[in-house]
Image (cartoon, helix red, strand yellow):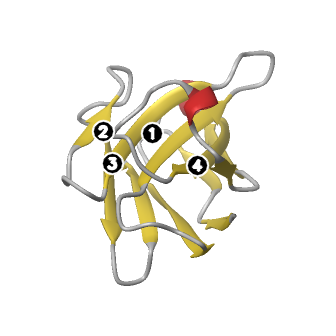
Amino acid sequence: QVQLVESGGGLVQTGGSLRLSCTASGRISNTWVMGWFRQAPGKEREFVAAFSRSDSTTYASASVRGRFTISRDNVKNTGYLQLNSLRPEDTAVYYCAVRQSGGLRLNEREYDDWGQGTQVTVAS
């Protein structure tokens, strides 16, 4: 099992930036995939971005592409989600999740372990 600890959420003004971190520990493979998801009040959880450690591929949803950047530190087993040009509609609880292998996935059901979530609030 993998434990994920997130940090970095907070309250920002429209146009501001935040960087979320997600550190993985436990029995993690060298081919892990980290995904970021978010859930706004009253809405379903949605995919934001993901990267694959094995082939360094990344993918971001259309709603955040060009504003959010996903990256990682393989030595620290830590993933990052840089949130720029934030909008009020980005307000949500952001979750990181890991699957041990198999490439990028956009479906939350294909991830095995989840972080506790971190709140991002963008004031207008």
Earlier residue among tags 2 and 4? 2
Q: Nearer the viewer, residue 2 or 70?
A: 2
Residue at which label 3 appears: 51
The reply to whether callout 1 and callout 2 are in contact (CB within 8 Å) is yes
Earlier residue among tags 3 and 1? 3
Q: Which amino acid lies under the numbered mark 3 shown in the image of this protein?
A: Phe
Q: Secondary structure at mark 2?
A: loop
Q: CA distance from mark 1 to mark 4?
A: 22 Å
Please provide percent x and percent y for residue 40: 70, 26
Quarter of the view holding residue 124: top right
Earlier residue among tags 1 and 4? 1
Q: Nearer the viewer, mark 2 or mark 4?
A: 4
Q: Secondary structure at mark 4?
A: strand
The reply to whether callout 2 and callout 4 are in contact (CB within 8 Å) is no
Please provide percent x and percent y for residue 118: 70, 53
Earlier residue among tags 4 and 3? 3
Name the residue rendered at 38%, 21% in the picture: 63
Mark 2 nearby-residue class (10 Å; few <14, some 14–19, many ≥20)? some
Please provide percent x and percent y for residue 116: 76, 55
Q: CA distance from mark 3 to mark 1?
A: 21 Å
Mark seen at residue 67 = 2
Mark 3 nearby-residue class (10 Å; few <14, some 14–19, many ≥20)? many
Mark seen at residue 97 = 4
Q: Which amino acid lies under the numbered mark 2 shown in the image of this protein?
A: Arg
Name the residue rendered at 66%, 51% in the picture: 113
Q: Which amino acid lies under the numbered mark 4 shown in the image of this protein?
A: Ala
